[in-house]
Image (cartoon, rainbow, N blue to C red):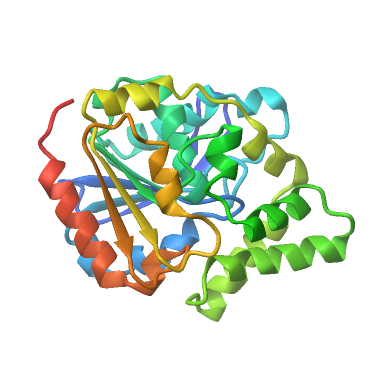
Amino acid sequence: MPFLPSADGTLIYAEAVGDASKPALVFIHGLALGLLVWNSIFEDPRWSEALYLVRYDTRGHGQSGMPTDAAAWESQRLAEDFDAVVNAFGLKNPFVLGWSLGATHIADVLAFHPPSYLSGIIHLAAVPYITEDAVAKPSSDAMKSLISVLLNPPDVASFQNAGISFIDLCTDDASFELQAVCRGYVLAQPGPVAQFVLGRTQNVTGLLTAGEQGLPLLALAGTDDLALNGSISYTFMEPFKDKEFVSIEGADHMAWLTDKDLMRETIVAWIYKNVHRVV
């Protein structure tokens, strides 16, 4: 069941590990990357013994379909991709973790579902949603410069160099294998897709209303993140009544590689604290 048809026919690649009777946590990767960034979590039995772990390549990334027409990038299409994953794996009110730009997909989901569709939101070094301020203000100057080149490369060499620097900016802790995988993801993504990912529009009312109604939010960010300032991102989630911010000392943009135990323990404890809540 790894390839799931979304409502518009786009195929979404997804995987799951663990005990389906445990609380489900859906992982959403960041810009230009794919689900393999989560390998160290999905291969760790301490995670899969506690939670049912689900991950997918968002449209335009990894092994999922890469449509290049504008209609395929309307907010509802991305919500339907998430729905396809939820339905295929029989998830009921999952928790969802959005990393970096992947967190914006949660706004898409809640634009078309009530808060009760999810049990809780986890933002990891997150861009909260797509507006000019919400993307630009938390992002470092270095990250904005690299993304500008990736979106409008003057030549092939510049694109390749920006792709390598993009991964290097995210982490110092990636294995050679993970570095190679991430560089491959970036270089394989069609240019128009990257434009759509960052240029699409969202209605964030559902997300912010969910927060006002008590949907819980856990935000995590590394103190040494050179790509994005998580504490600035957190300010965009002010309407959330039940929210918590955790700073991970010494962690970079890929915090799960830096302090594996703290991140796992924090997330698992928070999920079990909130698993029986109803919004």
Q: Is residue 125 visible?
A: no
Quadrant in which residue 183 is drawn: bottom right
Quadrant in which residue 131 is drawn: top right
Looking at the picture, tell me which residue is in the foreground, 68 or 9: 68
Looking at the picture, tell me which residue is in the foreground, 37 or 266: 266
> Where is the C terminus found, in terms of image quarters?
top left
76 with respect to 212 (left or right): right
> Where is the N terminus found, in terms of image quarters?
top left
Residue 43 position within the rendered picture, expressed as x and y whole percent measured from the top left:
33, 68
Q: Is residue 271 visible?
A: yes
Residue 173 position within the rendered picture, expressed as x and y whole percent measured from the top left:
47, 77
97 with respect to 243 (left or right): right
Q: Is residue 236 above or below residue 186?
A: above
Looking at the picture, tell me which residue is in the foreground, 18 or 140: 140
Looking at the picture, tell me which residue is in the foreground, 207 or 32: 207
| Farthest-out residue, right | 155
94 with respect to 2 (left or right): left
Q: Is residue 275 above or below residue 110?
A: below
Residue 217 position within the rendered picture, expressed as x and y whole percent measured from the top left:
28, 40
| Farthest-out residue, bottom | 176
Who's the residue at 72% across and 34% down the image? 68
Who's the residue at 58% across and 50% down the image? 31
Q: Is residue 218 above or below residue 261?
A: above
Please state the total of marks drawn on the protein image: 0
Who's the residue at 62% across and 42% down the image? 60
